[in-house]
Amino acid sequence: MSAAASAGRVEARMAELGLALPEVPAPAGTYVPALIDGTHVWTSGQLPFVDGALPSTGKVGHGEGLVAPELAQQLAATCVLNALAAIKGQIGDLDRITRVVKLVGFVSSDPSFTEQPGVINGASDLLGELLGQAGVHARSAVGVAVLPKDSPVELELVVEFA
């Protein structure tokens, strides 16, 4: 049986898209990556770590020395994969997600950059691709001066599960 065949529906969809669920990134401080409260999983802020490192750092914006919004959008999608890994660590199977309730996205922004919603669309779009209607969510996209480890993006998810 192939890995995609033995995986659940959500992870099989990831494989179709050429994506894989990463290991849960180690916390950068004194907290847990996610926790359960009733029928909800709340994630801590997830950075776009790939194999323990940030693939890009700095502020998002247009111009020399800034992280391009298109790259930041891809990094937001990476944050979603890390959040889903943390959620799976709590509930065991991503197919148990019945709804993404809320996504909060933070974008480390150049002072002139005002396209935070477009950056966080990278996360929202991936949730829709992976979860269908269950991936439709309420959302905030917030520009901030700086994020931990000079990450361009960070996000938090709240999901409901059965």
Image (cartoon, rainbow, N blue to C red):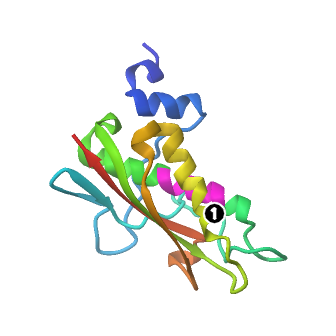
Q: Position of residue 153 (x, y in %)?
A: 56, 68
- Residue 100 vertical placement versus 97 (above, below): below
Task: Give the main secondary structure, helix, strand or loop, of the magenta stretch.
Answer: helix
Residue type at mark 1?
A: Val
Would you say 119 lies left or right of 47 here? right
Q: Residues within 10 Å of mark 1 (few under 14, many from 20)?
A: many
Residue assigned mark 1: 119
Q: Residue furthest left?
A: 38
Quarter of the rendering occupied by the N terminus: top left
In this picture, residue 57 sits left or right of residue 14: right
Residue 50 in sight in this render = no
Seen from the viewer's position, the closer of residues 86 and 98 is 98
| Residue 97 sits in quarter | top left
Residue pictured at 38% horizontal, 21% vertical: 6
Residue 101's quadrant in the figure?
A: bottom left
Give above or below for 48 relative to 5: below
The answer to whether 14 is drawn above or below residue 128 in the figure is: above
Q: Residue at 49% of width from left, 46% of height from top?
A: 127
Q: Which residues are magenta?
A: 73-80
Q: Position of residue 5 (x, y in %)?
A: 43, 18
Q: Position of residue 66 (x, y in %)?
A: 75, 75
State the quadrant of the C terminus: top left
- Helix, strand or loop under label 1: helix
Using the image as rendered, state which of residue 142 and residue 70 is in the foreground: 142
**Image location (x, y in percent) of residue 141:** 53, 69
Q: Residue at x 61, y 58 (%)?
A: 75
Direction from residue 58 to residue 26 in the image, left or right: left
